[in-house]
Image: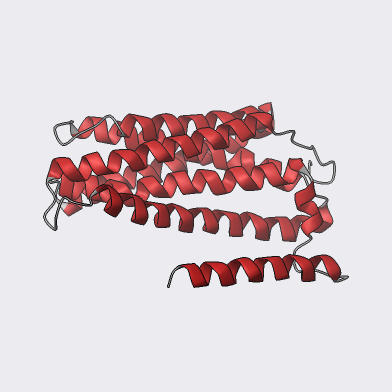
Amino acid sequence: AVLLPLLVSAMLFVAFQKIERGVQDPIIDLALFDKSSFSFPVATLVLSFVSGYLLTVLLPFCLIQGRHMRPAAAGLLLAVNGLIRVAAAPMSGRWSDKFGPKWLATFGAGTLAVGALFLSFLDQDSSVVGWTAGTLIAGAGLGIFVPPNNSMLLGAVPRSRHGVAAGVLATSRNVGMGLGVALAGIALPRALEGAGKTASAAAIIHASHGGFILAAAIATLAGLLCALARPKENIDFVR
């Protein structure tokens, strides 16, 4: 039941590439992906959102079922992740314009990895301060990462391709979110196999640790790709 849709998707993807490369005015100019200055930021954007949304899905289970927090209190703690991203993004954009995007994006991905790894060391007895700190670090990392990475992605294409690049950017972000949610949905039940329908608080948090470590590894890979990227400064893009 699962393999058939995957097979059909793969066949449609191959067909889409062949059609797009063969037409005069394609929906997506696939030649853009031949340039590492464009394809690397696309890959790191997907990876960062996979990592971020793995945490987004796993944290409510840890806080409510693992640490027995009230849903309202857990919701407030999780809101910290979004708020720190909102606060970090404008500053990161400013620093990116001033100092360049490459190393700032690398730092952001690394900070996301540190936050995810920090969360993997917490358990049901860890304080609210510890869970808040891990959530803050991860959220700040994603908030710092996105603006310079987007700058590299858009700066890699001429002005006439900014619309296509923006579409790829939005699609990459959504693909990352979807994959992160799917991975969390696979990782947590698999880790809880054998625990029964009423898994203990310790079992739920322990099962989430694997997902946190996976999120840290994915964010680390994104950071490495950022470090290897060679951003292209597009004269049409820079004001």
Q: Position of residue 154 (x, y in %)?
A: 72, 48
Q: Residue at x 15, y 46 (%)?
A: 69
Q: Residue at x 85, y 41 (%)?
A: 235
Q: Position of residue 218 (x, y in %)?
A: 49, 39
* 69 and 42: which is toward the camera: 42
Question: Which quarter of the rendering shows the C terminus?
Answer: top right
- Is 29 drawn above or below residue 82 in the view shown? below
Question: Which quarter of the rendering shows the N terminus?
Answer: bottom left
Q: Based on the displayed image, in which of its 4 quarters is residue 173 positioned?
A: bottom right
Left or right placement of residue 239 versus residue 140 in this view: right
Display coloring: secondary structure
Q: Position of residue 182 (x, y in %)?
A: 41, 57
- Is 155 drawn above or below residue 136 in the view shown? below
Residue placed furthest toward the right: 24
Q: Based on the displayed image, in which of its 4 quarters is residue 95 positioned?
A: top right
- Is 152 drawn above or below residue 195 in the view shown? above
Total residue callouts: 0
Q: Residue at x 30, y 38 (%)?
A: 209
Left or right placement of residue 193 versus residue 136 in this view: left
* 195 and 138: which is toward the camera: 195
Left or right placement of residue 77 versus residue 53 in this view: left
Q: Is residue 91 visible?
A: no
Q: Position of residue 147 (x, y in %)?
A: 59, 42
Q: Is residue 17 visible?
A: yes
Q: Residue at x 35, y 56 (%)?
A: 185
